Image (spheres, rainbow, N blue to C red):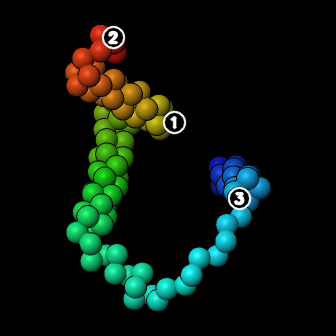
Amino acid sequence: MTFASVALCATVALLLVLRFLPTMPVAARGSVLGELRVFADRGMQLAIALTALGNVGVVTVFTYFTPLLTDIGGFAPGAVPVCYCWCTGRVRCSVITSVVGWPIRC
């Protein structure tokens, strides 16, 4: 059932993108080697490395904290995503209030 609902959402999103995305003229074609030259740029390498590091961090959180929440904390497996959303919202709120200085109560 979950796969079917995700597939349905993806199909609806695809149809909406195809419907509302404007048509654009085809750009001039370049060589594949010219396209791969972008990876020689130091900024691009840093962006790729930071993206990979962020993804590894997310996987680490799910891999490490989910057993802690379910086995030790006693949470149901369905409650784990709710815990993640609540905790990340609290952290974001705390960071924003400390950096910006807004008197928001988290």
Question: Alpha-carbon neighbours of circle 2 within 10 Å: few (<14), some, or many (≥20)?
Answer: few
**The one of 32 and 29 positioned closer to us in this rendering:** 29
The answer to whether one can see residue 20 in this image is: yes
Mark linked to residue 22: 3
Image depth: mark 2 or mark 1 in front: 2
Residue where numbered disc 1 is placed:
78
Which x, y percent locates residue 45? 26, 68
First-in-chain label (3 vs 2)? 3
Which x, y percent locates residue 27? 59, 76
Cα separation between marks 3 and 2: 43 Å
Q: Residue at 40% of width from left, 34% of height from top?
A: 84
**The one of 36 and 59 positioned closer to us in this rendering:** 36
* Residue 25 in which image quadrant: bottom right
Q: Judging from the image, what secondary structure is the residue with disc 3 in? A: loop
Q: Residue at 70% of width from left, 58% of height from top?
A: 22
The answer to whether one can see residue 8 in this image is: no
Image depth: mark 3 or mark 2 in front: 3
Residue type beneath disc 3:
Pro
Residue where numbered disc 2 is placed:
105
Which x, y percent locates residue 71? 35, 37
Residue type beneath disc 1:
Gly
